[in-house]
Image (cartoon, rainbow, N blue to C red):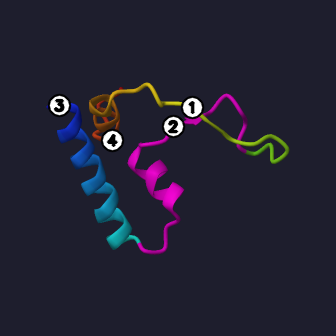
Amino acid sequence: MNRQEANREIVKRISEMVENQSDLRFHQVLNSLGVTVRDLSTKIEDRNEPIKVRDLIQEESVETLKRMNGNGG
């Protein structure tokens, strides 16, 4: 699969979840699908520290799609 095919599949899945789960906020959709990844080194229960999201800007779309499929990434 190439980058464009992976991008199309990612967008398709996001669109489907937005249509089927209209109560979710956009970043909830991304997190639920595995597009964004939280840095769990910050304790979630510690409300004084923001939950960090890993910067995945250099990640290839195919790797993002693998993570969405639960195959690592």
Q: CA distance from mark 4 to mark 1?
A: 15 Å
Give the mark toward the camera: 4 or 1.
Answer: 1
- Contact between marks 1 and 2 (CB within 8 A): the answer is yes
Q: Could you say whether the residue bearing mark 1 is in a helix, strand or loop?
A: loop
Q: Which residue is mark 3?
A: 2
- Contact between marks 3 and 4 (CB within 8 A): the answer is no
The region drawn magenta spans 22-44
Give the mark toward the camera: 3 or 1.
Answer: 3
Residue pictured at 43% horizontal, 74% vertical: 22
Q: Which residue is mark 2?
A: 37
x and y, in percent, of residue 9 in the image: 22, 48
Label 3 vs 1, first from the N-terminus: 3
Q: Which residue is mark 1?
A: 54
Disc 1 residue type (three-letter): Arg
Image quadrant for the N terminus?
top left
Q: Is residue 18 above or below residue 43?
A: below
Q: CA distance from mark 3 to mark 2?
A: 22 Å
Q: CA distance from mark 2 to mark 4?
A: 11 Å
Q: Is residue 58 above or below residue 24?
A: above
